[in-house]
Image (tube, grey):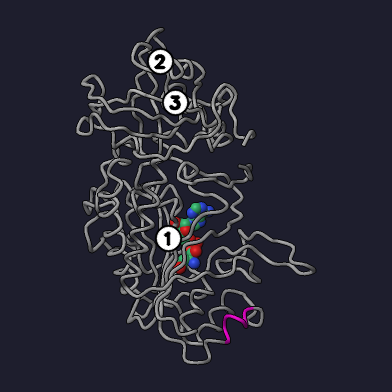
Amino acid sequence: MDFYKVAGTEPIGNEVRTHFSNQITAEIAGTDVVLMGWVHILRDKGKLKFLVLRDERGTVQVTIPQKRVPEEVFKTSGLLKPETAVSVTGKVTAAKQVASGAEVIPRKIRILNTSERLPIDVVEGKTDIDLDTRLNNRVLDLRKPSINAIFKVQHNLVRFARAFLESNDFIEIHTPKLVAEATEGGANLFEVKYFDRKAYLAQSPQFYKQLMLLAGFGRVYEIAPVFRAEKHNTRRHVNEYTSFDYEMAWISGVEDVMKMEENMLHHSFKMTKKHAAAELEILGVDLQIPKVPFKRIKYSEAIELVNEAGKGLTITDDLDPECERLLGEIFPKKYGTDMVYITHYPLELRPAYTMPSMTDEGMTESFDLTYKGMEITTGSQRIHLYDLLVERFKAKGFNPDDFAFYLDPFKYGAPPHGGLGLGVERMTMQLLGIENIREATLLPRDRDRLTP
Ligand code: AMO
């Protein structure tokens, strides 16, 4: 056991954590507790030392008066440094001067691991450091309660969206990320060497999630990484992100896909507001639960709105980020909401698998969901008719033979279907009002970053 021994202390003990920081309240004054965590803040007043201990749930004050603690404890407290990992055994004492109303007076402090001098501060607000330095030290950066909170909110958003789908008969699937062909067009594909052939990193589970409906699963979802070789560093693009995809068969139209999503997001936001209340408070975010149904406007109307605001776009022009931002300002004023579906995109702007519109000539049965001026979801009804699908692939300039693995199964009674892809990081950043997507990405990958 010698290798466990931290200089100046006893070897690792058999203490078992009994409480988290947020459970230390005046109501349990007199209780013996064992806490584990990091030294967040240290204040040394000579004969009196204060240690703010941080764990997964927050912080708690440990007060160390020389007169009232064993000599050994006072000695050990002198060895503590920021981010030393410790266990503290002691008694809860009511303390009016502490926000939580209680503190812990230790009977034992055990150093579980030491910490070297920190490259960045873990205590918030001490110094402003740039995002790049923070990301270089992401593990320490994530220890900050306000950074950590982002990913607890994200976890809740995903968990409740998933729960909603599961209660609606979706099953989770896992599709290959090494693929033979592009699904969303070739511009942002990562090429990889696959033995003596070329392969690509999946941009989307698109083809496979559709094929699993043809394989007889009625409703499927996948939450997994996808890869985009975006050439530019922007605040809304990373090169690997988490795509939340679902696909549903036997639909009567694209509306079924949109209804599922608005109800899913309503549920997820509502439950996140409840279950991540503490984190939302740390982040200072008052989560607005969007009203269902979400507002829907056609792409042609969106183009008119940005043109009224001074742009000069035609119907087949893409709504660039600047236009999305403009719409983000217009929507709340005009429709009283920041969650808006834009539907009926022109054929030119949508992938080959998108169902042409049955009502609007030259348009598609498709949609984007925009949230506070940014696209967070793309979806559509898919073409389930083999001949039409082949025709559309040809129209987009693809050789159908290259896509036989995808196209052939459509010859055998493919059900009408549709689905969508939602960017988890984009949803998180918009919900929390985060400026740069990297902040809502646990370990971002961008043009310049492949570690940590
Ligand atoms: P699309 O390419 O629009 O559609 O992507 C879907 C959603 O993914 C997010 N997103 C990104 N997030 C971070 N960094 C990026 N580089 C990035 N690119 C896209 C956005 C976007 O709305 N197969 C279709 C979906 C479908 O029809 O089912 C697709 O992938 O939030």
Q: Please name whichever residue, 302 or 280, is drawn nearer the observer in this view of the structure.
A: 280
Tell me, yes or no, if residue 449 can be seen here. Answer: yes
Q: Is residue 190 left or right of residue 222?
A: right
Q: Is mark 2 within 8 Å of ligand 1?
A: no
Task: Identify the residue at image location x=37%, y=63%.
Answer: 162
- Tell me which secondary structure the magenta stretch mostly adopts: helix
- Residue 303 placement (x, y as % from top left): 37, 58
> How far apart are the alpha carbons under marks 1 and 2?
46 Å
Q: Is residue 19 left or right of residue 1?
A: left
**Does the magenta portion include 407?**
yes
Task: Identify the residue at image location x=56%, y=69%.
Answer: 183
> How far apart are the alpha carbons under marks 2 and 3?
16 Å
Q: Nearer the viewer, mark 1 or mark 2?
A: 2
Which residue in the protein does label 3 denote?
Answer: 109
Residue type marked 3: Ile
The disc label shown at residue 422, or none? 1
Residue type marked 2: Arg
Q: Please name whichever residue, 55 or 227, is drawn nearer the observer in this view of the structure.
A: 55
Which residue in the protein does label 2 denote?
Answer: 43
Would you place residue 69 above or below residue 135 in this image? above
* Nearest to N terminus: mark 2 or mark 3: 2
Say if mark 1 contacts mark 3, CB within 8 Å: no
Q: Residues within 10 Å of mark 3 (few under 14, many from 20)?
A: many
- Quadrant housing residue 54: top left
